């Protein structure tokens, strides 16, 4: 399933203008849920990050990010 919302700005993923979001995505964890655009609770640690949506659960940084 394709993301309905941008995980960096929370706007519709189909809308244009996400060039800055793509650059931020390389360095930062997601800030908004890609399914519902709710602001997520993000915790960054030396070992990676976790991001939690109150409706859709938790996601983790991919292996080898840090």
Image: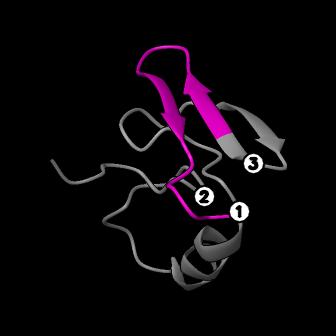
Q: Nearer the viewer, residue 34 or 13?
A: 34
How far across and down, in percent of the image, does residue 14 sit? 30, 66
Residue at the disc numbered 2: 8
Residue at 69% over, 44% down: 49
Between the C-alphas of marks 1 and 2, the distance is 9 Å
Residue at 54% over, 14% down: 54
N-terminal of the pair, mark 1 or mark 2, is 2
For the residues carrying marks 2 and 3, which lies nearer the camera in this image?
3
Q: Which mark is residue 49?
A: none
Residue at 57% over, 49% down: 61
How far across and down, in percent of the image, does residue 20 sit? 63, 81
N-terminal of the pair, mark 1 or mark 3, is 1
Image quadrant holding the C terminus, namely bottom right
Residue at the disc numbered 3: 47
Q: Is residue 29 magenta?
A: no
Residue at the disc numbered 1: 28
Badge 3 crowding class, 10 Å Cα cut-off, few under 14, some 14 to 19, many 20 or more, is: few
Q: Is disc 3 placed on a helix, strand or loop?
A: loop
Badge 1 crowding class, 10 Å Cα cut-off, few under 14, some 14 to 19, many 20 or more, is: few
Q: Residue furthest left?
A: 1
Q: Is disc 2 placed on a helix, strand or loop?
A: loop
Q: Are marks 1 and 2 in contact (CB under 8 Å)?
A: yes
Q: Residue furthest right?
A: 46
Magenta residues span 50-66
Between the C-alphas of marks 1 and 3, the distance is 14 Å
For the residues carrying marks 1 and 3, which lies nearer the camera in this image?
3
């Amino acid at each position: 399933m394709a993301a309905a919302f941008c995980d960096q700005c929370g706007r519709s993923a189909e809308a244009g203008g996400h060039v800055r979001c793509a650059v931020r995505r390389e360095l930062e964890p997601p800030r908004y849920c890609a399914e519902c655009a709710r602001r997520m609770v993000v915790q960054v640690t030396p070992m990676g990050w976790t991001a939690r949506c109150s409706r859709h659960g938790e996601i983790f940084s991919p292996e080898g990010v840090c």
